Image (cartoon, rainbow, N blue to C red):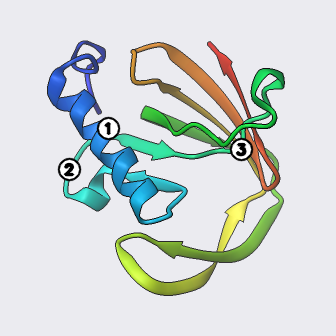
């Protein structure tokens, strides 16, 4: 885990920018720090977030630092997924239909996401 005081460091901010650039360059939807050889609890993603102000725009990548994932309910969905670390290989992966994620954003603000197999919604905690 990262200390909240480390989030604003130039090195962490550059890592987040580099991860977002890599994810976009390789047409990914998410990338975790261990996938780029960094043993940190950082995840970047382009999520379809339900937000009235941005309904017609492309998803803006977000960073989740020290995420805490909670499964909501017991429904599981299975779908095809790929991994940027292993190009051109896809597999069927079971995932919880709905989760909540509590994390810090890249500015150190506490956020909570509710995600389902269809979309995500974000609120500040």
Give the camera-side residue of 77 and 72: 77
Q: Are marks 3 and 1 in contact (CB under 8 Å)?
A: no
Position in image of residue 58 (x %, y %): 67, 43
Instruction: Indicate whether 5 appears above or below 37.
Output: above
Q: Is mark 2 on a helix, strand or loop?
A: loop
Position in image of residue 7 (x %, y %): 28, 21
Give the camera-side residue of 78 and 75: 78
Position in image of residue 96 (x %, y %): 72, 58
What's the distance in space between the residues labelled 3 and 1, CA to CA?
Answer: 19 Å
Neighbor class of circle 1 (other Cα within 10 Å; few <14, some 14-19, many 20+) is some
Q: Mark 1 points at which residue?
A: 17
The disc placed on residue 82 is none
Give the camera-side residue of 112 and 87: 87
What's the distance in space between the residues labelled 1 and 2, CA to CA?
Answer: 14 Å
Q: Mark 3 points at which residue?
A: 48
Among numbered discs 1 and 2, the one appearing first in the sequence = 1
Neighbor class of circle 2 (other Cα within 10 Å; few <14, some 14-19, many 20+) is few
Q: Residue at x 46, y 86 (%)?
A: 88
What's the distance in space between the residues labelled 3 and 2, CA to CA?
Answer: 26 Å
Position in image of residue 31 (x %, y %): 42, 54
Q: Name the residue under label 2.
A: 38
Neighbor class of circle 3 (other Cα within 10 Å; few <14, some 14-19, many 20+) is some
Q: Is residue 43 left or right of residue 58?
A: left
Q: Which residue is drawn at 46% across and 34% down?
A: 64
Q: In this view, does 31 lie to the left or right of 12?
A: right
Q: Which residue is drawn at 84% across and 24% down?
A: 52
Image quadrant where one finds the N terminus:
top left
Among numbered discs 3 and 1, the one appearing first in the sequence = 1
Instruction: Indicate whether 78 appears above or below 71.
Output: below
Among numbered discs 3 and 2, the one appearing first in the sequence = 2
Q: In which quarter of the image is residue 8?
A: top left
């Amino acid at each position: 885990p990262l200390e909240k005081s480390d989030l604003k460091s130039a090195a962490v901010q550059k890592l987040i920018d580099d991860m977002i650039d890599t994810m976009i360059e390789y047409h990914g939807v998410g990338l975790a720090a261990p996938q780029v050889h960094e043993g940190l609890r950082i995840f970047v993603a382009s999520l379809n977030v339900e937000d009235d102000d941005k309904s017609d725009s492309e998803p803006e990548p977000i960073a989740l630092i020290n995420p805490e994932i909670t499964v909501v309910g017991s429904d599981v969905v299975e779908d095809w997924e790929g991994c940027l670390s292993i190009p051109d290989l896809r597999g069927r992966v079971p995932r919880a239909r709905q989760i909540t994620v509590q994390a810090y954003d890249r500015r150190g603000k506490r956020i909570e996401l509710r995600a389902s197999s269809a979309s995500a919604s974000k609120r500040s905690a």
